[in-house]
């Protein structure tokens, strides 16, 4: 059995400083998600300080939603710092199918070999150069459609690729896991995926990326399941989700995680 | 009787992709409001991709709060795409009385003939070139003070103008409606108006703009009324509002809407 | 006894327009905090309009989180307008220890003599040029470690300096107060400090800065205590906090404030 709770406990013990260059929609919720799970968030994007700040951080996330060329350059700078220092960083290709700018920026970021790439099925298919039915920022494809693409992409970066969906899939190109935690209401509120990037990054600090990512996905999904028990709609779900993530114990995490080799 | 529920049902059936260039304060809540009501939101502003993205969207909203000249130019580009494609777009002149920049930008956007202009009474009076008692971003005038201004403005753009307030007014310059739904707590939380723009845009996809806007205003106000029944203050109101918008059925919408010809 | 409630009542009577140049993470919550407490918020940063808008506002806050050189220049412009007009403004040196850019910008802003500087202990120590153990944006030092630094800094600006922590300290360089209100959950959600800046600025309109700041800190902490009674975690705390701030009466404020001369 995957000892999910041990990864959660270790992350909380470290309480890593996670540097995020994320989109404007996600910033507040992502900071609260990181605080709730037990990490320390910082949102820093300005070229004038981004590399200096990255040097202080234990992990990084970059997210191409609401980016522009200047922010994209900041992501490359910060990613380079993490790569040079051997620290984990997570890249999220939000809506990559939508525009040429997003494809170009994503390709440059992939070239820096992120520790983890996380996206929905359509985004991972697009990144891998395969056909996708994406529209805007929503996934038009299923996770199982994207498993082969995820393995190819992981083979190219030497890192981990995670595909989010009803059942998540995570792979390092050779081994893989399916994580069957979560709640359908997670798709009815915004930036749930964006915020998850931070949790993955925090779990990856001083822990093996494939197993840590699987644990992060399971804990996140579990918090969603707990929140779903009391929520009456997306507003109360969002509130209950932060409470659940905060209250989740390592024992509950290990017991509730549904992770299977794949 | 205005069949408000039919407009809501049709919008949910379409689940339109709504492209928003809105202010930083509103982005997260507006995305959640659009998801809750049944549409698909995307926030995209960068010049490098804004026109390409607008080409994929079924509707657009632009909002001049927290804008700068670069963002303003992006709004003009995206508005032009929508106008050229005959797709609905909504313009919100937040705080237009406050600065010369806002007035200039608003005038340029009005020149592109938005499908719907939505603002509070002071904003609509300012846009129409009439006297307003505005201070900052709050309305210092009443909706009835602004009805003539709204008709004039609609006459100039050939579109619809909506004035938000305790009783909303919407007109295409000839016909009009008053919508008497809502709750006073809606004025005690931020970006309720900004988020409404997205709902209006979503309702206008493949539906006649005057009737669709009236329906959107009624549904939004109704969700506020439902939320107000359980809220203890602005925090719990915000949560209950998203739940109510998500849970609102077409039947409830038609039954609860208080729309009268004006 | 410090008549905290009288300061709250006077602020609500004025309902001041507070102009904020704050970070992206804080904008929405800060606007809701200001509305809940009874003030009128506006977020405006663009160079093209920032000075014009500052001329309309009764108070200003500037916050260096997520700033860049352009935003920094806007802060200097707006701060100058307030200083020239003798209106209160609050400066928050978020994470000043982290980067050279933040230190340079903070030093320029301090040179404009803000009415109030508010930060955590590490930020105030760093500003005063003393040793700090800061990491990222969290305080690594205790409030009592920073009291001498706060007095030195207040002596340099001729204004008030507030140090946030489990027990807050506020001084004008000569006199001081300790405020023992608050709840530990306030450290588990983001932007609680950033949002407080707005409340302090609102209280300082037409009221003496040292006493008004102490009152603002006490009211804010009291709302946290009330919220903490019902919250199950950081999600429900955030909701209950806005409700409590909205519902706080002057009588409760005076009765609950724990302010002592120091």
Image (tube, coloured by chain):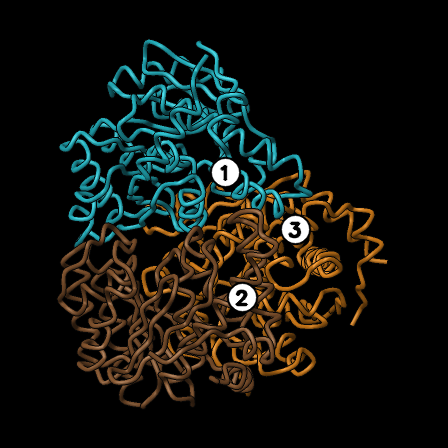
Chain colours: A brown, B cyan, C orange
Q: Residue C51 vs residue C85: left or right?
A: left
Q: Is residue B16 visible?
A: yes
**Do marks 2 and 1 share a chain?**
no
> Tag 3, which secondary structure?
helix
Subunit of label 2: A
Depth check: give the residue in front, A4 or C7: A4
* Front disc: 1 or 3: 1
| Total labels drawn | 3
Quarter holding residue A195: bottom left
Which residue is drawn at the image coordinates 60% and 80% (left, top)? A251
Depth check: give the residue in front, A107 or B245: B245
Subunit of label 1: B
Which residue is drawn at the image coordinates 20% and 76% (left, top)? A153
> Tag 1, which secondary structure?
helix
Subunit of label 3: C
Q: Image quadrant for the C terminus of chain B? A: top left
Q: Which residue is mark 2?
A: A223
Q: Where residue A63 sits: x, y (%)?
A: 31, 66
Q: Are marks 2 and 1 in contact (CB under 8 Å)?
A: no
Q: Where residue A167 sits: x, y (%)?
A: 38, 66
**Res. B245 mark:** 1
Depth check: give the residue in front, C175 or A31: A31
Q: Is residue B142 visible?
A: no
Q: Which residue is mark 3?
A: C203
Q: Where residue A241 sits: x, y (%)?
A: 55, 61
Q: What separation in Å lies between label 2 and label 1 (alpha carbons)?
A: 24 Å
- From this view, report whether residue C20 is shown above or below residue A23: above
- From this view, report whether residue C169 is shown above or below residue C146: above
Which residue is drawn at the image coordinates 46% and 80% (left, top)? A17
């Amino acid at each position: 059995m995957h000892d999910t709770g041990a990864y959660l406990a270790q992350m909380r013990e470290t309480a890593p400083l996670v540097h995020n260059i994320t989109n404007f929609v996600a910033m507040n919720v992502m900071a609260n998600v990181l605080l709730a799970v037990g990490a320390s968030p910082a949102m820093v994007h300005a070229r004038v300080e981004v590399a200096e700040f990255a040097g202080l951080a234990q992990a990084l996330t970059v997210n191409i939603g609401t980016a522009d060329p200047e922010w994209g350059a900041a992501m490359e700078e910060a990613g380079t710092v993490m790569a040079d220092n051997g620290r984990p960083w997570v890249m999220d290709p939000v809506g990559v199918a939508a525009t040429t700018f997003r494809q170009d920026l994503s390709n440059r970021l992939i070239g820096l070999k992120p520790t983890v790439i996380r996206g929905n099925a359509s985004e991972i298919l697009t990144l891998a150069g395969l056909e996708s039915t994406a529209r805007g920022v929503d996934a038009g494809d299923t996770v199982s459609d994207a498993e082969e693409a995820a393995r190819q992409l992981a083979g190219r970066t030497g890192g981990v690729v995670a595909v989010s969906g009803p059942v998540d899939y995570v792979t390092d190109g050779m081994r893989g896991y399916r994580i069957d935690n979560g709640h359908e209401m997670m798709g009815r509120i915004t930036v749930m995926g964006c915020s998850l990037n931070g949790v993955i990054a925090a779990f990856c600090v001083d822990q093996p990326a494939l197993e840590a990512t699987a644990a992060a996905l399971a804990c996140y999904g579990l918090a969603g399941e707990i929140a779903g028990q009391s929520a009456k709609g997306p507003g109360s779900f969002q509130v209950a989700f932060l409470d659940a993530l905060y209250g989740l114990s390592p024992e509950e995490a290990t017991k509730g995680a549904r992770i299977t080799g794949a």
